[in-house]
Image: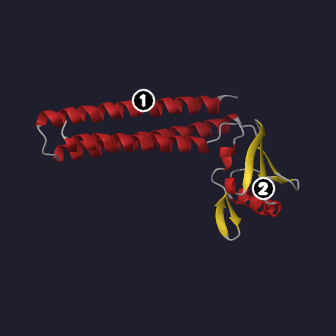
Amino acid sequence: MNEELKFIVDSTKELMQNAIAHLEKEFRNIRAGKASPAMLGNVTVDYYGSQTPLTQVANVSTMDAHTITVQPWEKHMLHEIEKAIMIANLGFNPMNNGEVIIINVPVLTEERRKELSKQAKAAAEAAKIGIRNDRKEAMHEIKKTDASEDMKANAEIDIQKLTDKFILEVDEHYKVKDQEIMKV
């Protein structure tokens, strides 16, 4: 295969892998009823004047399936961490006992589960759109090369195979996440 065509196929594969990685990150932010330290992954705390990720100023862990605990490295940070969790607008009500912050994760209602499933579906569709756009861009780049028509056709077939593979992977990820969300 022509060096230029090989580069196009390889870079398209990398872009599609990035779409999958982004989807996995999106799915981690959609809670599925079970308490997880990842639920607080986007929380940043004002730590001596700079916004710092929560995990860099405290130990975040789960006590059980419905409780997250946040134990700061420095006790004077309790109030700041509590405030940051409230500001993050995650729907949690943190409780401070003077030592640690305890967050009770409420059980999901059926209506909320359906809403989260729709969110997951939308994220999966966005990933598929990204993958198809990567395919479209690659096909356009292939047409612009000065390789022979046979080589171009083979490269287009490779791109289509990659597209099909990654679309299937998105569907698998969604199926697993949907089952996780709907499980009571």
The residue shown at (22%, 46%) is 141
Where is residue 98 shown, x and y percent of the image? 88, 56
The residue shown at (58%, 32%) is 178
Instruction: Give the left or right position of residue 44, taking residue 163 as reference.
Output: right
Mark 1 highlights which residue?
168
Quick one: 123 or 77, which is closer to the camera?
A: 77
Quarter the C terminus occupies: top right
Quick one: 153 or 6, which is closer to the camera?
A: 6
Q: Amino acid at mark 2?
A: Pro
> With respect to residue 66, does 165 lie above or below?
above
Circles 2 and 1, Cβ within 8 Å, touching? The answer is no
Question: How many neighbours does mark 2 have within 10 angstroms: few (below 14), some (14-19), or many (20 or more)?
Answer: many
Task: Determine which of the numbered discs, if any, sits on residue 69 in the image.
Answer: none
Instruction: Give the left or right position of residue 4, taking residue 36 as reference.
Output: left
Residue 134 position by quadrant: top left
Quick one: 79 or 125, which is closer to the camera?
A: 79
Mark 2 highlights which residue?
72
Residue 133 position by quadrant: top left
Quarter the N terminus occupies: top left
> In this orientation, does residue 89 appear?
no
Helix, strand or loop for disc 2 = strand
Q: Amino acid at mark 1?
A: Leu
Instruction: Give the left or right position of residue 25, taking residue 167 as reference.
Output: right
Where is residue 131 shown, x and y percent of the image? 38, 41
Tell me the distance, in whole angstroms, between the alpha carbons under discs 2 and 1.
Answer: 42 Å
